[in-house]
Amino acid sequence: MAKRLSRVQTIALGFLMIIAVGTVLLMLPIASRNGQSAGFFNALFTATSSTCVTGLVVVDTYTSWSLFGQVVLLLLIQIGGLGFITIGVCFSIFLKRRIGLKERNLIQESMNTLQIGGTVRLVLKIVRFTLIFEGIGALLLMIRFIPQFGVAEGIWYGIFHSISAFCNAGFDLMGKIEPYSSLMLYGDDVLVNIVIMALIVIGGIGFIVWDDISTHKWNVKKYMLHTKIVLATSLILIVAGSFFFYLSEHQNLASFDTKGQVLASVFGAVTPRTAGFNTIDTASYSEAGRMLTVVLMFIGGSPGSTAGGIKTTTMVVILLYVWSTLRGKSGLNIFGRRLDEDCIKKAATVFFINLLLAVVCCLVMSGLERSLPLSDIFMEVFSAIGTVGISTGITRDVSLLSKCILIFLMYCGRIGSMSFALSFTERKHNAMVKLPVERITIG
């Protein structure tokens, strides 16, 4: 049967298997802090959220899960962030097994790399960089957490939050101080904010970009077009997002001094793409702030990264295509290069599928949860499909059916909504016969 599965189907099935294993482990009494089984659904939702590096929770991570349960969550986050294909290839290399063409094709599909050559080398570089970034992040966070929580717990907190931030997961252990508080107690803490934001951005720009930067260092002219688009778009989204977040949430920022306002504004622009931490109570966001957050969550990070969303490159291609059409020009040109037609088709497909899926689920959930404001539901749905984890606090209060919708969206968001659709429709052969062309009126 495995031979008949396409690359997309293999990846989709692999994530399902990881979620199933995680669910079983989290159902064990040893995984719960009270020594009793968390139940199938709580375990399923948490396993899905951690494997899909989302961060939406139905129970507080610290108060509900024991150390064993937290370790399971962290393993699921790491596997989900890097991708099980990457982990599997690392084990194969460690056991000195040959990496065949099929495995290399899977790596290319899971990493969204542009070519199959050098994929094994890329995997090794990804693992090495991941350990370095997560290790540095953990050590820096320990500077703050060890004096606050003690040596053993401070070390664990540093490791947990570093991996959670780098994998754009958004899970936290701050329930020890106040359940569901995320990082609100560190709203004006320079060290925690800078480290967490740096890890989110590094994890979200993509493995392809890492490889390109490590190869060409500071020689920007030699960067691939993909790298240039990702870096430029990420910078614009952070700067513009911070500015608009400050404008929309200046009342919520009033309790901070100037330093705290700057940190909170930048954090509010970085975390929706797609980490899920928050330093300001998201339930208190203004309508403008919620809309800004939804837009950033929908865009997400970059291809081949730990982040979700439609990705920065997709958004750039769509905007370029609209701008080019309005100007009556053919072809998409950027940074002295022209994008091919397949790029446009794929970007439009990804954009439309994600938007359609989110809107339909918003309508269904609004019908199921009539007592909840529509803006809360929009935040929840776009947070799930973007694998973000930002919530106004309604995740644990919605009905069972609504939670099932969120599970489905988190899964689609992690493997890619387009990949999920392709797993059902992909065919090995294309039809050779084409129907006659007839024009229709558009617009």
Image: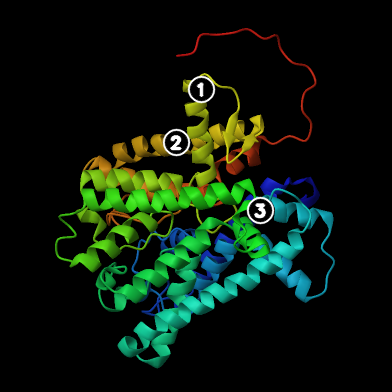
Mark 1 is surrounded, within 10 Å at the Cα level, by few (under 14), some (14 to 19) or many (20 or more) other residues, namely few
Earlier along the polypeptide chain: callout 1 or callout 2?
1
- Which residue is the site of mark 2? 355
In the image, residue 180 above or below residue 32 = above
Which residue is at 82% across, 63% downward? 99
Residue in the picture at 26% in, 78% down: 177
Q: Of the residues shown, which amino acid type is indicated by label 2? A: Leu
Tag 3 residue:
222
Which of the two discs, 3 and 2, labels the residue nearer the N terminus? 3
Kind of residue at disc 1: Thr
In three-dimensional space, the C-alpha distance between marks 3 and 2, rounded to whole angstroms, equals: 35 Å
x and y percentages locating residue 207 in the rendered image: 61, 59
Q: Which mark's residue is nearer the viewer, 1 or 2?
A: 1
Q: CA distance from mark 1 to mark 2?
A: 21 Å
- x and y percentages locating residue 321 in the rendered image: 52, 29
- Element on which disc 2 rests: helix
